[in-house]
Image (spheres, grey):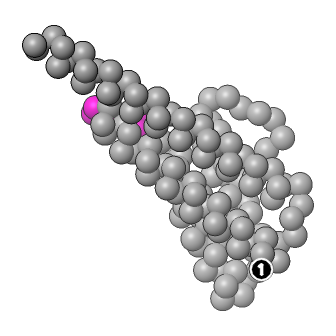
């Protein structure tokens, strides 16, 4: 995860791959298996949900799907904090980079949602003004 990628889809795919690698490195204890499963689901979902968002039928649909991306990224953040807190894996450079990328993706997706909401509000105002 050392190289910065600016294409969001590719970043989400790289993030998902890194989550898979991280979850595979967790212990086979009951807690390790549970957290790994949760981390896999929430960490891989953003890439796939972003694919859905790209095919959104409306700006509102796009916002809804991006909110789901954000929700899953935040859930992944909690899973990683548990991994670190429970010492299921040492906080090495790879895990620190994954945590950092998670925070960056949260910020990007949140900003994208804000921008889409702003654009939707502008469209709605313009539509009201043109019908008046």
Above-or-below relation of 37 to 11: below
For image coordinates 70% across by 65% down, the residue present is: 80
Residues 86 and 125: in front is: 125
User: Would residue 130 be visible to someone looking at this image?
Assistant: yes
Location of residue 82 (image quadrant): bottom right
**Mark 1, residue position:** 86
Residue 55 inside the magenta-drawn segment: yes
Q: In the image, is 110 to the left or to the right of 78?
A: left
Residue 120 percent coordinates (x, y): 33, 27
Residue 92 is a magenta residue: no
Q: Vertical placement of 119 versus 86: above or below?
A: above
Residue drawn at point x = 40 percent, y = 28 percent: 118
Residue 119 placement: quadrant: top left
Magenta-drawn stretch, dominant element (helix, strand or loop) = loop
Q: Is mark 1 on a helix, strand or loop?
A: loop
Q: Which residue lies furthest to the left in this view?
A: 132
- Front residue of 42/33: it is 42
The residue stretch that appears in magenta? 53-58
Using the image as rendered, state which of residue 123 and residue 76 is in the foreground.
123
In the rendered image, the quadrant that contains the N terminus is top right
Q: Looking at the picture, does residue 26 appear above or below residue 48?
A: below
């Amino acid at each position: 995860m050392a190289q910065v990628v600016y294409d969001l889809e590719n970043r989400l795919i790289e993030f998902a791959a890194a989550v898979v690698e991280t979850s595979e490195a967790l212990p086979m204890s009951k807690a390790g298996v549970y957290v790994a499963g949760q981390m896999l689901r929430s960490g891989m979902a953003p890439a796939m949900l972003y694919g859905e968002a790209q095919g959104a039928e409306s700006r509102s649909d796009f916002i809804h799907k991006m909110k789901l991306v954000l929700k899953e990224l935040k859930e992944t953040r909690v899973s990683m904090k548990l991994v670190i807190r429970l010492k299921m894996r040492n906080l090495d450079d790879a895990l620190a980079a994954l945590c950092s990328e998670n925070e960056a993706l949260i910020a990007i997706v949140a900003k994208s949602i804000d921008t889409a909401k702003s654009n939707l509000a502008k469209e709605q105002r313009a539509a009201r003004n043109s019908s008046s």
